[in-house]
Image (cartoon, rainbow, N blue to C red):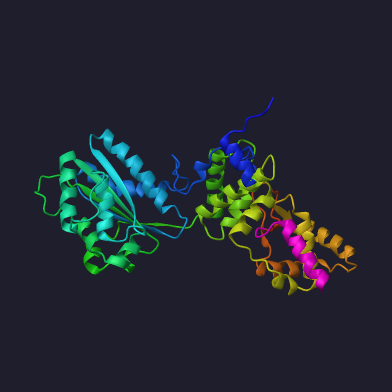
Amino acid sequence: MKTIMRPFELIVRMAGFEDKPQRIISDFSKLDFDYVPEKLVHRDGPMQQLFSILKSSIEDSTNQRVAVTGSVGTGKSSLSKRFCLDFREWASGKGQRVEFVIVNCRSRNTPSSVLLKILEKFQPGFPDRGFSTTEMLEILRKHLTKGNVHLLIVLDEVNVMVKKSGSDLLYCLSRFDDERVTDSKHSLSLIMISQQPVNEFLDAATLSTLKRTNQIVLDKYSRPELGDITRQRAELAFHPGTVDDEIIEFIADISSEFGDARFAIELLENAGRMANDEGQESVNPENVRAAKAMTYSVVTESKLASLGLQKQLVLLGISRMMRKRAFATTGEAEKSYAVACEEFDQKARGHTQFWEYLRTLGDMGLIGLGTSGKGMVGKTSIITLPDIPCRVLEDKLLQVMVKE
C-alpha cells in the first residue's frame, strides 16, 4: 500500500530537516524570558516591599510612584509583572478594580508612543497620531474615571525614554491626580524599571515627585539562588528524570559569574535542545558546556599554544576525564594528568607544581577552581570545565600539541 505523505512532512523532507520527537523538554513556553512563574524564587522581600508601598493606593486612595533597579537578569520585569497580576487579584477582593499596562520604553521611547500603548488598553485601535500629550492624558483620565479604575503603569527601561525624550511625561504622570477634587479617588500609580538608579537620569523636578524610600534595588542572584531558579524551570519545562541535580548545580556554577537568571535559563534550554538532538535520554555536562560555547568561548588556539607542554597535559587530562562529569576533585585530575604524561613520554611533575598549574589555568579562565558543595563530604577542592565541550577542547589541544 502506498504511503501518502502529508504536505508538511513533504516540506520537511525536501528541506532536509529531521523532526525528532521531543523527549527532553516538555514545555518550551516555561523557558521563555516573558514567562512569569506563579511563584518567583527568592523575590519575596521585594514583592512585599512593592505591596507595602502600593497597597495605600487602594486602602487610602493615594497614588504612588516606585522605582525598581538592578542589573540585567535580576528579575526586575518578572517581579513587576507578577506583582501586578497578584495586586489586581488582591484589590478585586477589596472591591476595587485595578488594571495594569506594561510599556517597554526601549521600543516605545517617546511620550506619545507610551501613551498610545496605555490608551489601547481601554480603547483598542486608538489613532496613533492627531492628539497632543495633554489631550491623550485627558482622554486617559476620562477612561479611568468612567470605569472607576486604579491603573498601574509599568515603564520598563524607563531610562531609555528619558534619555531620548526627557522626563516631562514622568512628571505629568506623577502629578496626574493633582487637579482632582479633594474627595476623589486617586487613579494612577507608577512603577519605573531601570538598570541605573533614577537619581542618575531624572531631573530635579521629577525627582521631587518621588519618595526617596520608594526605591527597590534588586541584587544579583547568588549561586544557590540561581540553582533554585534553574531547578524550578527544569521542573516546569522538562520531562521528569531528564535533568539531575548535578546538571542544575553545574548551570548555577557557570551563571553565578554574572548573577543572571536569564543566562541560567538560556543555558538550561539550549542544553536540553542539544541533548534531544543527539538522541539522549537526559542532559549531560557536555550539553551544558556546548550551550555556553554557543554564547561565548574563552578558548582559542593561541591561548592554548601559550600554555607550554606541561599545562597542556594537565588540561588534556582534565578534558578526557570530565566528558561525562560536571565536577572533579583535584586528586582525580592529578591522576588523569599523569596518564596523559605517560602517553606523551613526559615525566609528571609533583603535587605542588601540579597545583600551581591548576591555579594558572584557573587565572586564565580555562578551568574553574572552587571548594566542594552539595553532595560532597568535607571540604574538597573541585575543578569545573564550564566554557567548552570536553571533546572540542581535547581536539584543539591535540592540534596545538602536534604543531609543536
Q: Specify whether 400 is left or right of 282.
A: right
Q: Position of residue 94 (x, y in %)?
A: 25, 35
In the rendered structure, the answer to whether residue 256 lies left or right of residue 337 reads left
Compared with 73, 27 (above or below) is above
Residue 402 lies in the magenta-colored region: yes
The quarter of the image holding the N terminus is top right
Residue 270 position, x and y percent, is 59, 50
Tally of marks: 0
At x 36% / y 45%, what residue is drawn? Answer: 83
333, above or below 274, in the image = below
By secondary structure, the bulk of the magenta-drawn segment is best described as helix
Which residue does the image show at 48% across and 45% down from the upper left?
Answer: 41
On the rendered structure, is 178 left or right of 78? Answer: left
Residue at the farthest top position: 1
**Residue 243 in sight:** no
Q: Nearer the viewer, residue 70 or 44?
A: 70
Q: Quadrant of the C terminus?
A: bottom right
Q: Residue at x 30, y 56 (%)?
A: 214
Residue at the far front: name it.
2
Please tell me which residue lies in front, 125 or 209. Answer: 125
Q: Residue furthest left?
A: 181
**Residue 63 magenta-drawn?**
no
Residue 338 percent across, percent down from the top left: 85, 62
**Residue 403 coordinates in the image, percent (x, y):** 81, 72
- Looking at the rendering, the stretch of residues picked out in magenta corresponds to 386-404
Q: Image check: 302 left or right of 206?
A: right
Whether residue 294 is visible, yes or no, is yes
